[in-house]
Amino acid sequence: MMKLIHYFLLLCFFLCLFGCRENVKDLDYCFIHETDQSFVNNDKSDMSQFQEDKLKRASLIKKNFKDLVNYSESFGFPYVEPNTSVLDSCKYWAVTMTMIHAAQIQPEEFFSEKNIKLFKKELEKGNIRIELMEQSVIIMVRTYDICRNLESAIKYALSVWGLKNNLLNDAKFIDCKIH
């Protein structure tokens, strides 16, 4: 009888454990993709509106990145496979665009020690494709000036992630005022 109770308790434990994992709330990838593409304004005829839209969009991208990092810390980075992007295009584009845009608008956060380690771990687990990290760096380098005080952190990240420093050949490092 005692053995039966132990089996029952063990069964209850595993059911609870797996039941809890099933209740993990996934990210709303379509919403993330939609917000990433919101406030895209190329009309510079009204510069105040252009700047306002740019700030709103940056704020949404920062929130999306924070949500992606928090999710990754708890459940692992959401794996996306380009060959199956048609099956889940929201997920593919949400994750891809969030990573690329986060590297552009907040490289200090993207290349923080915490995120360097997190992304390394997720690369090793196979959840992040190295091509996504490479794309994020290449697009950041080609589209934005980068504060010189981030250069060593970026080079360190490339080394940790297994990327070559020549990705920074086109980088324009500038002196920035620290607030």
Image (cartoon, grey):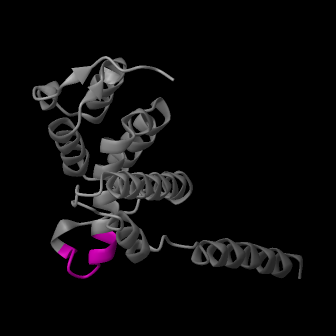
Question: Which of the 4 image quarters holds residue 25?
Answer: bottom right
The residue segment tinted magenta is 84-92
Residue 75, percent across and down? 52, 60
Question: Which of the 4 image quarters holds residue 30?
Answer: bottom left
Between 152 and 26, the one lying in front of the other is 152
Left or right relative to 73: residue 146 = left
Query: Does the magenta-highlighted stretch encompass residue 133?
Result: no
Q: Quadrant of the N terminus?
A: bottom right
Number of residue marks:
0
Residue 17, percent across and down? 67, 71
Where 98 falls versus 164 (above or below)? below
Q: Residue furthest right?
A: 2
Residue at x 45%, y 39% (from the top left corner): 115
Left or right relative to 131: residue 55 = right
Left or right relative to 40: residue 82 = left
Residue at x 36%, y 53% (from the top left corner): 54
Left or right relative to 17: residue 58 = left
Where 115 falls versus 13 (above or below)? above
